Amino acid sequence: MSVAQLLDGTAVARRSFAETAERAADFAAAQGRSVCLATVLIGDDPASQTYVRMKQRRAAQLGLESRRVRLSAETTTDEAVAAVRALSEDDTVDGILVQHPAPAQVDELAVFEAIAPKKDVDGVTMHSFAAMGLSANGFHSCTPEGIVRLLDAYDVPTAGRRVCVVGRSAILGKPVGLLLLARDATVTFCHSHTTDLAAQVSEADIVVAAVGRPELVRGEWIKPDAVVVDAGYNPGNVGDVEFSRAAARASYITPVPGGVGPMTIAVLMEQTVTAAENRVR
Amino acid sequence: MSVAQLLDGTAVARRSFAETAERAADFAAAQGRSVCLATVLIGDDPASQTYVRMKQRRAAQLGLESRRVRLSAETTTDEAVAAVRALSEDDTVDGILVQHPAPAQVDELAVFEAIAPKKDVDGVTMHSFAAMGLSANGFHSCTPEGIVRLLDAYDVPTAGRRVCVVGRSAILGKPVGLLLLARDATVTFCHSHTTDLAAQVSEADIVVAAVGRPELVRGEWIKPDAVVVDAGYNPGNVGDVEFSRAAARASYITPVPGGVGPMTIAVLMEQTVTAAENRVR
């Protein structure tokens, strides 16, 4: 029985980080200031705090400055919008990350829309969504773009391949499907109303699991030699795919963790430097 | 052998026109001016001239005013953008339609982006694309929305159904797939790189052909009792689906013409009145 090769996001991201650090250093040398990423954290969700801290730490390692905005768990939509709009208008801020999810009383889409498209380095605005869907200029959502980069790093062909995306969220399932559609894949979007998920997955050359349900995708559904990308990250380091049995059938598979996650941060950092470069161009 | 019931777009559009005319009359009575649709035609393409004239004529029948802007075949992108931007800023204009396609030297996407989202009654801006993809506020592309309305008019269920969209254009294939995904269908996008189109179509409960290639979709591919929506319109009144053989297998099918086309205009008219109502609200 063959075992799939790992799509090693940690290794691919490491190369990206090195390039991004160089570009950040060049920018700082030329402009006399560091690239600045503003992070907005609303509320006290421990996982969100961890995610923001990871991003800030990585930014610091690459020579980026972080601007940290903390808003209380009682923040209103208007207050959050005002805070983000101020960052959009602040000439010393290059990129803005609003950590998802916001507390329930906050209209997250309204807050995202307060991010100027040219600073939307996390790819969460309507403009960025359309840029991905229409292959127009704009930033990409970090996880979807990270998945495409990871496939590229391993020369996984997409044109004419059947892709099954499990999940249809605004910043993961839908955009990754649209990006792969732009790469000429035949893309199917599956979700909680899909009645024949096993059949859909079993027909796919590339499976992208992006739904946040532990091991929803069973190993025996995977077509022999398919490519499996697991963007799920559930408690206990469990992905959305039943890893070991899927790995026994697939040609390539992402580990969890160490697959999609590092790529997400790599794209965020790279797009932040690009935003800075674009602004002085 | 059963024969499919027709999805009679002409009849459904007629009911929509009657409602829109009433709303337009109410608006005129309350505001002392008619709802105004601006049409922008760039160049001399005969088909485009015909389409614009049809829309203007329908607008007049429903009590809408038309503002006609004609730009020469030599118009530059900058000139077209300036003309459209002027309409976006003109308080007497409620909706703007830029007839597709523009001449080759014009960057059509840039011209579309000059349409203010609140006047984008044809649903061609990035904002409108994202609104469709993210179920956010905004106008919808007219043909995709018309297709959804037509399915609704015949109580065709979409949740959990397999939809095969053949075509991935910015204002037809992609948005209609996204709208049906929002209606909980399992949606597959097929296109010129799809290697197994016959198999994909044959698995679909609803087929939307939106590619502009005469009879590309063969009748024998249609699953028995599937619903067939033909958004193609090719010379000689030929659609993208082999009509008679598809009709012998399908439960519902759109005629060409008289299926999707009238619905497109119905949505355009309705959205124009909505734009006017929104602006005075």
Image (cartoon, coloured by chain):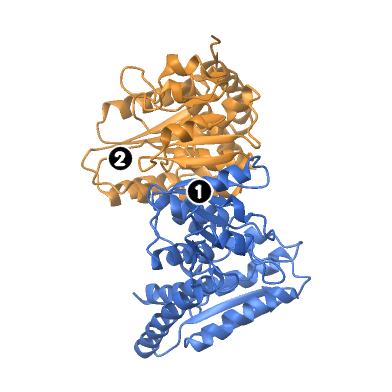
Chain colours: A orange, B blue
Which residue is disc 1 drawn over? B204
Left or right: A257 in relation to A146: left
- Residue B170 percent across, percent down from the top left: 59, 55
Q: Looking at the rendering, in which quadrant would you find the C terminus of chain A? A: top right
Residue sticking out furthest to the right: B74
Which residue is disc 2 drawn over? A102
Residue type (three-letter) at the residue carrying disc 1: Ala
Residue A80 visible in the picture: yes
Residue type (three-letter) at the residue carrying disc 2: Ala
Q: Name the residue located 67 percent from the left edge and 71 percent from the top edge.
A: B237
Q: Name the residue located 60 percent from the left edge and 52 percent from the top edge.
A: B220
Q: Nearer the viewer, mark 1 or mark 2?
A: 1
Left or right: A223 in relation to B131: right
Same chain for the residues under marks 1 and 2 in the image: no
Q: State whether residue B258 is above or below residue A237.
A: below
Q: State whether residue B10 is above or below residue B164.
A: below
Q: Name the residue located 58 percent from the left edge and 83 percent from the top edge.
A: B56
Q: Residues within 10 Å of mark 2 (few under 14, many from 20)?
A: many
- Residue B152 percent across, percent down from the top left: 39, 64
Q: State whether residue B87 is above or below residue B140.
A: below
Callout 2: helix, strand or loop? Answer: loop
- Residue B79 percent across, percent down from the top left: 70, 69
Residue sticking out furthest to the front: B1
Callout 1: helix, strand or loop? Answer: loop
Q: Name the residue located 50 percent from the left edge and 72 percent from the top edge.
A: B9
